[in-house]
């Protein structure tokens, strides 16, 4: 039943986002003109910078996990950690409704940590990431606020910043008083009355999951993780800016500042934290266009002259990231540290471990 709900949400998101971004005849015609106007000698250096920055993104995103695992007594060498993370990132992208989040915790179990505790580290990772990108977006939106700004802008910025701030408070409370926090949440869900045995089992798993929050007690590892994360997101935003500079060589009206690139990255990142369409298709492009529209007038308007360039940018950005994570995931599976059998086992055990 749970899987059916997840799939329904995922397919619903896919249908909605594809409808929002599907190009009309005018956009297709403009894309053809843009393709013919492309000068590879001018575009290639910016593409190279984008890919170079994405190497930094991938390494930071992979290696920082060690700082979350260290308080659990686990330290994974860089090679296996990058391989495991690469396969996990590919699974997050490929599986619907964020189900791929269970894969990394499942794969790391062989290193001496329970999948539940490892899933707790992923929860910390997601909330810290959410706070960082929410702060990026909030700062950008606050600077842009005014009578001509979109009506959705500030409410969205306040909402997501508030959600991740509350989530961080919950992590701290859960870490300090795990049994009391879990008991309160279960009572609020009424599960002890409806399914007492399931409630007892779930309580055990949730308390084990909270072990993954131990990094919040470790100032050194937490600080190092935050630095890794800041570099990761900054390199990601600079990659968006470099790619936008490349598209500026095609259409001089397509101008995006570094601040605008960070905000665009943040809006897209927040958008794909929702139940994701398979491969984030449509969802990634729509939220990228939404972010661009804050700085480039008409970027999300199919009737605007700039839309075709913005649409092409969003799709090239998406395809490059899709290819990157698929290729890195396949390379991870080709290493001696991860196998396809491990991947299947991790996916099957993930929800159980979390429950």
Image (cartoon, helix red, strand yellow):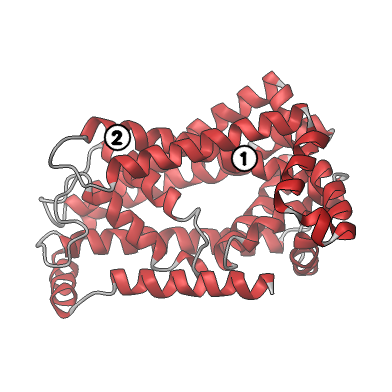
Q: Percent position (x, y) of residue 151?
A: 23, 47
Quadrant position of the N terminus in the picture: bottom right
Residue 256 pos. (x, y %): 21, 43
Instruction: Identify the residue position indicated by label 2 in the image.
Output: 140
In the shown orientation, is residue 92 left or right of residue 142? right
In primary-sequence order, the first of circles 1 and 2 is 1
Helix, strand or loop under label 1? helix
Q: For this rendering, which residue is in front, 223 or 128?
A: 128
Separation of marks 1 and 2 at Cα, in angstroms? 23 Å
Image point (76%, 48%), residue name? 186
Q: Is 69 situated left or right of 147 in this image?
A: right
Q: Is residue 238 visible?
A: no
In the image, residue 79 sits, relative to residue 93, either above or below, namely above
Instruction: Examine the image and state in which quarter residue 160 appears.
Output: top left
Relative placement, left or right, of 310 versus 88 is left
Q: Residue furthest top?
A: 219
The residue depicted at 66 percent of the width and 47 percent of the height is 82
Q: Judge the density around disc 2: few (<14), some (14-19), many (≥20) Cα neighbours within 10 Å.
A: many
Q: Looking at the picture, tell me which residue is in the foreground, 84 or 106.
A: 106
Residue 50: numbered disc: none
Q: In x, y percent, where is residue 166?
A: 55, 35
Residue that lies at the very extreme toward the front in this rendered image: 193
Q: What residue would you read off at disc 1?
A: 125
Q: Secondary structure at mark 2?
A: helix
Q: Residue at x 80, y 61 (%)?
A: 194
Q: Is residue 166 above or below residue 198?
A: above
Residue 117 sits in which quadrant?
Answer: top right
| Of residues 288 and 63, the one drawn nearer to the viewer in this rendering | 288
Placement of the C terminus among the 4 image quadrants: bottom right
Q: Is residue 305 visible?
A: yes
Residue drawn at (17%, 67%) of the image: 302
């Amino acid at each position: 039943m749970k899987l059916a709900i997840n799939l329904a949400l995922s397919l619903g998101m896919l249908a909605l986002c594809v409808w929002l971004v599907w190009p009309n005849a005018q956009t297709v015609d403009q894309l053809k003109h843009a393709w013919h106007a492309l000068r590879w000698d001018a575009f290639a250096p910016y593409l190279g910078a984008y890919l170079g920055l994405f190497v930094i993104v991938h390494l930071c995103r992979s290696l920082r996990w060690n700082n979350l695992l260290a308080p659990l007594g686990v330290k994974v060498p860089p090679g296996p950690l990058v391989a495991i993370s690469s396969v996990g990132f590919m699974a997050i992208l490929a599986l619907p409704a964020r189900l791929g989040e269970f894969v990394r915790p499942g794969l790391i179990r062989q290193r001496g940590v329970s999948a539940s505790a490892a899933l707790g580290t992923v929860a910390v990772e997601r909330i810290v990431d959410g706070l960082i990108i929410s702060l990026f977006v909030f700062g950008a939106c606050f600077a842009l606020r005014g009578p001509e700004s979109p009506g959705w802008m500030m409410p969205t910025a306040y909402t997501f910043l508030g959600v991740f701030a509350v989530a961080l408070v919950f992590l701290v409370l859960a870490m300090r008083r795990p049994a009391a926090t879990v008991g309160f949440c279960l009572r609020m869900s009424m599960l002890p009355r409806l399914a007492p045995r399931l409630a007892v089992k779930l309580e055990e798993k949730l308390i084990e999951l909270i072990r993954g929050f131990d990094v919040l007690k470790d100032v050194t590892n937490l600080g190092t993780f935050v630095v890794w994360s800041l570099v990761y997101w900054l390199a990601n935003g600079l990659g968006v800016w470099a790619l936008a500079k490349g598209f500026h060589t095609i259409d001089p009206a397509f101008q995006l500042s570094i601040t605008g690139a960070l905000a665009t990255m943040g809006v897209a990142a927040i958008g794909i934290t929702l139940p994701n369409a398979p491969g984030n298709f449509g969802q990634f492009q729509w939220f990228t266009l939404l972010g661009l529209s804050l700085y480039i007038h008409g970027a999300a308007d199919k009737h605007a002259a700039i839309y075709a360039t913005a649409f092409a940018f969003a799709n090239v950005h998406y395809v490059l990231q899709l290819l990157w994570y698929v290729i890195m995931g396949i390379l991870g599976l080709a290493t001696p540290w991860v196998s396809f059998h491990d991947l299947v086992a991790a996916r099957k055990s993930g929800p159980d471990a979390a429950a």
